[in-house]
Amino acid sequence: MAWTKKQTLIALLMVVTGSINTLSTKWADQMTAVNSAGDDVPFVHPYFQTDGMFIGEISCMFAFYILRCWTRRRRLGQVEMAPSNEQNTHFPKLVLLLPAMCDTLATSTMYLGLTLTYASSFQMLRGAVIVFTGLLSVAFLGRKMRYFQWIGIFVVIAGLVIVGVSDFIGGNETSGYTTNGIITGDLLIIAAQVVTATQMVLEEKFVTKLNVPPLLVVGWEGLFGFTIMTILLVPFNWIQVGAFSGNPRHVLEDIPDAFTQLGNNPTLIAPIVGNIVSIAFFNFAGVSVTKELSATTRMVLDSVRTFIIWIIALLIPWQKFQYLQPIGFAVLLVGMMLYNDVVILPILRKYGWLNDAQPEDVEPVLASSSSERTTESVEKDGIDNPNATVEPL
């Protein structure tokens, strides 16, 4: 069935805002401005940008309440013949504190890694979340994974290796990046996926059963994350990290220096605001796509977003073409489809080439979440939902 204009619009909104989110963050990293020491240097303030990202997530809470008021106004005068199916808005807010702490650590680590590597690699390497989500779900949630999920994990690992090798080979071909820096950035991004997977497991164990609206979850986690990150910025202003830092005082984060650079180059405000606005609309579009279309469609659109980021990075150009990178992306995509049991295996079953009926006592390990993500509402609690998918790309 063809998409309606509304469905096409929200799908386009998700792809565009998702692409802008990564590209605007990288754009800020690439721009230069005079710092507090009088030197014209790149804007390397990953923790400052993390705080901005949380502001975007907080706006999802306002979006939720605005939409709820609008929905209630539409229902005025209507006779309710059945009980309301509104989701729970009165829940213990502190249950989102641990996931928010994971979100803070994961996002700040990924943004730090992004300052050292390519935007396309940043997006592709986030596919590692499938591996860690599957393993942690088995270990801490007692789930059982089917054969195609294990195959998907190993295929994803192969794709990650290929993408990493492409970065290693191309490290000396592009000015502004060193091989050691790229390897460090890639490893930071992959390490952050362990924390993101932990966040997914925590949300599955403590949050999903509460039936909280997705936008409200994002908003509260954004509020907690913003509070945590803002508090941490105080000691970060005094922790010495030497040459690893990108600011003149060589501290973990120098907020006064960030504002100095923003003042000396007002153009920097554009990518900062772009990051905040895009994360808000991306989360809203993600919820809408899952509701209007399906979680599988959202996964496909997320993959399109990765492809667009790679193409734009080549055109600007922020990087040179490396033949292994599209190969690695294709392998990652195949692994993701195998793990989530979409496209490949359903086609094989449709034509009778595969007969792998699922035993009743096996529970699939399927989750849906990310740092720039939305927690979707499902009829069945938890990651047993057959329509849910891991959306790393």
Image: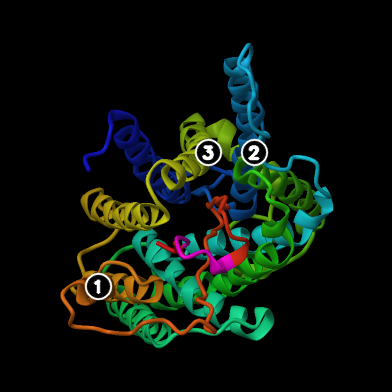
User: x, y percentage for residue 195?
Assistant: 63, 70
Q: Distance between the residues labelled 3 and 2?
A: 38 Å
**Mark nearer the viewer, 3 or 1:** 1
The residue that appears at 64% across and 53% down in the rendered structure is 47
Tell me which numbered mark, 3 or 1, is placed earlier along the sequence. Answer: 3
Q: In this view, does 91 lie above or below 154?
A: above
Q: Nearer the viewer, residue 390 or 292?
A: 292
Give 373 or 77, whichever is nearer the viewer. 77
Counting residues from the N terminus, which is met first, the one under dot 3 or under dot 2? 2
> In what element is the residue under mark 1?
helix
Checking the image for residue 272, the label placed there is: 3
Magenta: main secondary structure: loop
Q: Which amino acid does label 2 sit on?
A: Asn
Q: Gap between marks 2 and 1, in whole Å?
A: 35 Å
The residue type indicated by label 1 comes to Ile
The label number, if any, that marks residue 85 in the structure image: 2
Task: Measuring from the top left, give residue 134's x and y in whole percent.
Answer: 53, 79
Identify which residue is drawn at 60% across, 30% down: 63
Quadrant in the picture for the N terminus: top left
Residue 191 quadrant:
bottom right
**Identity of the amino acid at label 3?**
Ile
Q: Which residue is drawn at 47% across and 38% down?
A: 271
Q: Quick check: 90 above or below 175?
A: above
Rendered location of residue 280, percent (x, y) = 54, 38
| Residue count near mark 1 (Cα–Cα under 10 Å), binned few <14, some 14–19, many ≥20 | few
Q: Residues within 10 Å of mark 3 (few under 14, many from 20)?
A: many
Q: Which residue lies furthest to the top in this view?
A: 77
- According to the image, label 1 marks what residue? 344
Span shown in magenta: 383-388
